[in-house]
Amino acid sequence: MGWHGVANGGTEFEATITPLVVISCLMAASGGLMFGYDVGISGGVTSMPDFLKKFFPTVYRNQQVPGLTGNYCKYDNQGLQLFTSSLYLAAIIATLFASYITKRLGRKMSMLIAGILFLAGTILNAAAVNLAMLIIGRLLLGCGVGFANQAIPLFLSEIAPTRIRGALNILFQLFITIGILGANLINYGTAKLANGYGWRISLGLAGVPALLLTVGSLIVTDTPNSLIARGKLEEGKAILKRIRGVDNVDQEYNEIVDASRAATEVKNPFKNLLKRRNRPTLVIGIMMQIFQQFTGINAIMFYAPVLFQTLGFKSNASLVSAAITGSVNVVSTIVSVILVDIAGRRKLLIQAGFQMFLSQMVVAVLMGLKVKDHSNNLGHNLGILVVVLVCSFVASFAWSWGPLGWLIPSETFAAETRSAGQSMVVSTNMLFTFVIAQAFLSMLCHMKFGIFYFFSAWVLVMTLFTYFFIPETKNIPIDEMNERVWKQHWYWKRYMEDLQDVPKAEDQVDGS
């Protein structure tokens, strides 16, 4: 069954949900498995005694000698944090190169490079014999993540029909959550191995999602928008017919061509990104990445096993608890896939903000009352309550800031700033992911339970920001955003005053 999207001026263009679109989106989104697997695997590996003994003997000694350090400080080690955070440092730099390649050579090429880089990093990590080898492997993994996070959200937004763009784009986040869950389950299994090589297996299995993306990028077609922007007009039109499932694509094709021509007139996309009319999308794109990290989600997902050990869970119990939160993450992201194009983006963000705030505040109070530096009176029942509250926090994040932090920027940048804008978004995300990953264990040591008050305060701020400044973009074609979103918004419309100087094609539907 087909559906009709309404373009500017009431013109209609037809598109069916074709198997090619669904398969292409699934294969591209599988790149999220790479990112998710790494997020999940890092925390589990860094809580394995054999791994710590080999690479971080100081942390291992702190863990083994009771009372040597407090409950909150047993993992406070800059080298250990660098193992996790170095990936994101590399991703910041890689995404700047990825922006150029994504624009000049296509989304498909960037995804292929991402898969190859991740494979190389996986081999180094699994075979590591010293810390330098481990960090170099992490840097290569980071380059892969930078290329993947640059190209995949753009690919999904451009190839998906407008009415289900949100759901198909969130597949990327869904695969991230599946990767995290898979990593948690693998860590639980490998931690039981007696030969001391469990951590090598955990790190080496990252090659599976990397191989999936590499093969997938060879199979999928590039987007019509990317092909047309690179001058391959006939190929772009043929692909457009295939992915839309109809022969009459002239209206949509012409609109993509017009938008691409307007985009090619921009000689410096990054400089253009700073123009006044692009400020709303740039500010929202950057702020969403900062806010996404300052929910505290990656701190919890990176270090879930470590965090649960701090709360008094034994090693295996902490890995089980992390697997539970990983499962909640997957299920809740599926909720987002279902609701995002029905309820809309704003309602999910605001509702989740209140739920995250309350969950973190209660955890902070419980830890403040029961978990001291050298004593832990949390007990079994309160321990279960903490896991439930962490799951409540993870669930609300997974149907809101997790997927929408990637979706909203990828669908709101104008054609001529889309690749550069996505590069800025990914760079900002990776920068603040690096900051949180590098600082969290030290923050936990010095702020203790207060770290949850810190994150909950940020959640309150971002919920207020959402209410006042983030508009609804549900069911609006991505090149109609200026006319139907920004020019209508109570605050952002003041930045749209100079749009009379912009070619009209910029605001037309490109069929993405």
Image (cartoon, helix red, strand yellow):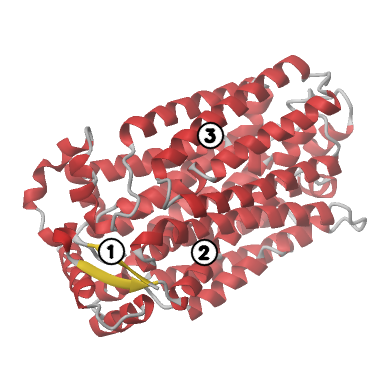
Q: Residue at x 20, y 41 (%)?
A: 488
Dot 3 alpha-carbon crowd within 10 angstroms: few under 14, some 14 to 19, many 20 or more: many
Q: Are marks 1 and 3 in contact (CB under 8 Å)?
A: no
Pointer 3: what residue? 295
Q: Secondary structure at mark 3?
A: loop
276 or 63: nearer the eye?
A: 276
Dividing the image into 4 quarters, which one contains the N terminus? bottom left
Q: Amino acid at mark 2?
A: Ala
Q: In the rendering, which numbered label is found on residue 407?
A: none
Left or right side of 192 for 70: left
Q: Which residue is mark 2?
A: 29
| Image quadrant assignment for residue 67 | top right
Give left or right: position of 73 versus 262. right
User: Tag 1, which secondary structure?
Assistant: strand
Position of residue 126 measured from the top left corner of the image (x, y, whole percent): 73, 62
As drawn, 98 above or below 365: below
Q: Position of residue 142 (x, y in %)?
A: 54, 56
Can residue 297 be seen at all in this image of the molecule? yes
Q: Amino acid at mark 3?
A: Thr
Give the amino acid type for the residue marked by disc 1 in the picture.
Gly
- Mark 1 Cα-neighbour bin, 10 Å: few <14, some 14–19, many ≥20: some
The span from disc 2 to disc 1 (Cα, nearest Å) is: 24 Å
- The percent position of residue 460, horizontal first and vertical second, equals 47, 25
| Residue at mark 1 | 5
Q: Residue furthest top?
A: 369
Picture quadrant of residue 57? top right
- Which of the marked residues, 1 or 3, is nearer the chain's N terminus? 1
Is 507 in front, or is 60?
A: 507
